[in-house]
Image (cartoon, rainbow, N blue to C red):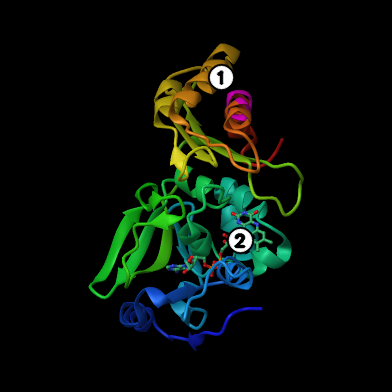
Amino acid sequence: MIPEFKLYLPESVEEACKLRSELGPAAEIVAGGTDVYVKMHKGEHRPKFIIDIKNIPELKDIKGDEKTGLDIGSMVTHHEVETSDVVLKHYPVLFEGVNTIGSLQIRNRGTLGGNICTAAPSADGIGPLLVLNAICVVQGLKGMRTIPLEDFFSGPKQTVLKKDDVLVRILVPPVTGENGSAYYKYGRRKAMEIALMGITVYVEVNADGKSCSDARLALATSAPIPIRAKMTEAYLKGKDLSDPVVLKAAGKLVLEEAKPRSSWRSSAEFRRNLLRNLVPKIIHRAYRNVSSGVGYAE
Ligand SMILES: Cc1cc2nc3c(=O)[nH]c(=O)nc-3n(C[C@H](O)[C@H](O)[C@H](O)COP(=O)(O)OP(=O)(O)OC[C@H]3O[C@@H](n4cnc5c(N)ncnc54)[C@H](O)[C@@H]3O)c2cc1C
């Protein structure tokens, strides 16, 4: 059973920030509730006050296109993301990541903002947003500010949000050049599985169609927080992405910056083996998707 709590339903972001600040640490924001209510049900979490932000209209829309970039309200659900035409056409890697989350029921309730704020190292929505250089727009009592998603996580399941902050929007800059991307979630079964490993790759290639002009690689469940593998990215720039020697070297190099740990799901050693073997494959898949124009085609 869910423990008793007092419910607040603010109708504006300002009101939500004020409530957060006044009610203090005993209050919890709820977006879709797929993390918060599950933890409460298990008895792992007992907030006295719930600030449910579902009645704030300005958090619920996806705006933008391939030229302006995306501007996604934090309350947009995973299902709204995965069925957005502009996401499918121009940001397929975001479709890919979000499409692997839970079940349709979970994706119908769970929000992109909730996925980011849960800050789980395994979150499937975060890697795609990291390689797309997403920016978080945060509002607090003192006003609005932006935080690159890369700087949003301060520790396992922790964010840099202050006690009066609400994540309001997620900005995704336009993608440029000849690009391809891919997300791969490794789990023991296909459905309703938390990622044992999540690998997201975004690459751009030069006019020769082979050499890499930009590479971005994000790893889930490979460190205490979701990370970008900057050393491996730097190594890939200028390299021929069809060369197996380059791909193998990337799989070796990534182990120098990933810090997977052992958990009841898997040992650190198994995760390191996954990285060594899967990173080359997913880079190659992203590279092949440059010409196919999609991020999810195999
Ligand atoms: C059966 C099941 C399967 C799942 N499978 C997956 C999976 O495959 N992959 C995956 O990544 N996740 C999975 N999840 C976890 C969860 O569904 C996602 O993380 C989801 O995106 C959380 O979003 P939410 O809106 O429900 O968050 P909530 O539960 O409402 O909130 C989560 C946290 O974020 C905070 N928060 C939410 N919105 C804001 C905001 N705008 N500003 C500030 N703080 C905010 C809340 O205070 C809370 O701490 C699963 C969960 C369940 C129950």
Q: Amino acid at mark 2?
A: Ser
Please provide the residue range marked out in magenta: 273-277
- Which of discs 2 and 1 lies nearer the camera? The answer is 1
Q: Position of residue 291 (x, y in %)?
A: 61, 31
Q: Quadrant of the C terminus?
A: top right
Residue 84: numbered disc: 2
Q: Quadrant of residue 15?
A: bottom left
Name the residue rendered at 45%, 50% in the picture. Answer: 156
Give the structural element (helix, strand or loop) at label 1: helix
| Local crowd size for mark 2, using a 10 Å CA cut-off: few (<14), some (14–19), many (≥20) | some
Q: Quadrant of the N terminus?
A: bottom right
Residue 29: numbered disc: none
Q: Position of residue 92 (x, y in %)?
A: 60, 47
Q: Is residue 68 visible?
A: no
**Ligand 1 is in which quadrant of the figure?**
bottom right
From the viewer's perspective, is 23 left or right of 88?
A: left
Q: Is residue 153 visible?
A: yes
Q: Position of residue 228 (x, y in %)?
A: 44, 38
Q: Main secondary structure of the magenta part?
A: helix
